[in-house]
Image (tube, rainbow, N blue to C red):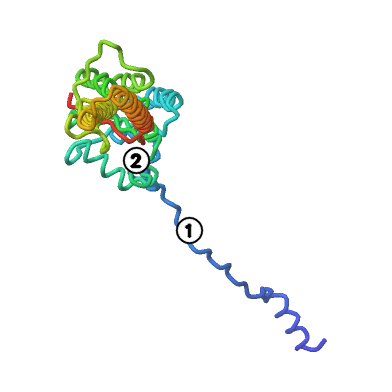
Amino acid sequence: MAWWVVLGAALAATTPPTSPPTTAPATPPATVPATTVPGAVDPLGCAALVHDPSGELDVGVVTAAAGRAAQALGADLHVRAERDVDGGLDARMVQLEAQCPTWWAGADRAPELVVVMYSSSDREASVFYGPGQSDDLEFRWEHAVDEMGARFADGDYTAGVVAGLDALREDAPTTYEPTASPTHYDDDSPSSPGVPAVVWLALIALVAVAVVRVASFLRTGEWSTGDGDSDESSRHTSRRRMSSWSSSTSRQSSSSSSASSTRPRRSGGGTKKW
């Protein structure tokens, strides 16, 4: 065997096989996990049934009470435990109305909105409601605030809120005496806030009837010729005129009373210290 054949065989036996070049797999881009920030979607808690950023409430208990009240009233109800607020809870409500889209509709609060809130640092409690809730809450809201304040003074915020929510569901006791100023409307008589508009309309109608009667008497007395038949005819004419005026005035008064009873409802509520 030729020496170069032997040398080639020896080299083949000692040289390791050459592997084909490999390509390193591409490194996938790093994925940054999404960070969930509590309250990021609704930082003001506008949609929350119970908003308690300081953890002062037993949220489970308050949520149950709020659900009962919301169902009984058919309301869009929100309970808020506020921290320090500039200008008090009245100013806070104005801020929330401006920044919570579902809390405002047209020129007034959303019709079925009901907000129950308090500030432990400012020692204030409030109930605010929209015009759709005025029939139920106009004479209940202050009693509910007083029920809250009595318990807040003892430091029991959960019991206070629950008592207030329960008070919104039923009329105040007949022995309850409100101390806040009553809610006034633009179409009420400005000269006497304590007298209903329908009473003033009735008084105006009576004065109008009296004036017409005097004027009719003066006319028939001046134009009388002294003839008995003519006098009798004048008296009958006067009566007919008066009857017509009285009927017309009565209809106008009735129409005004009906208009007053269908007066547009408006929002209300307020804040009290405790």
Marks 2/1: CA–CA distance: 45 Å
Q: Is residue 25 above or below residue 213?
A: below
Q: Nearer the viewer, residue 57 or 31?
A: 57
The residue pinned by badge 2 equals 109
Name the outermost residue toward the right. 1
**Amino acid found under the numbered disc labelled 2:** Arg
What residue lies at 45% left-to-right and 53% top-to-bottom? 33
Whether residue 125 is visible to the viewer of this picture, yes or no, is no
Q: Quadrant of residue 147?
A: top left
- Coordinates of residue 51 in the picture (x, y in percent): 34, 35
Sequence-earlier tag: 2 or 1: 1
- Determine crowd level at label 2: few under 14, some 14-19, many 20+ residues with C-alpha closer than 10 A: many
- Coordinates of residue 21 in the picture (x, y in percent): 63, 75
Whether residue 265 is visible to the viewer of this picture, yes or no, is yes
Q: Quadrant of residue 52?
A: top left
Q: Quadrant of residue 93?
A: top left
- Determine crowd level at label 1: few under 14, some 14-19, many 20+ residues with C-alpha closer than 10 A: few
Q: Nearer the viewer, residue 164 or 108?
A: 108
- Coordinates of residue 115 in the picture (x, y in percent): 33, 33
Q: Secondary structure at mark 1?
A: loop
Q: Looking at the figure, which quarter contains the C terminus?
A: top left
Q: Looking at the figure, which quarter contains the N terminus?
A: bottom right
Q: Is residue 159 above or below residue 265?
A: above
- Coordinates of residue 100 in the picture (x, y in percent): 35, 45
**Amino acid found under the numbered disc labelled 1:** Thr
Q: Secondary structure at mark 2?
A: strand
CB atoms of marks 2 and 1 within 8 Å = no
Mark drawn on residue 31: 1
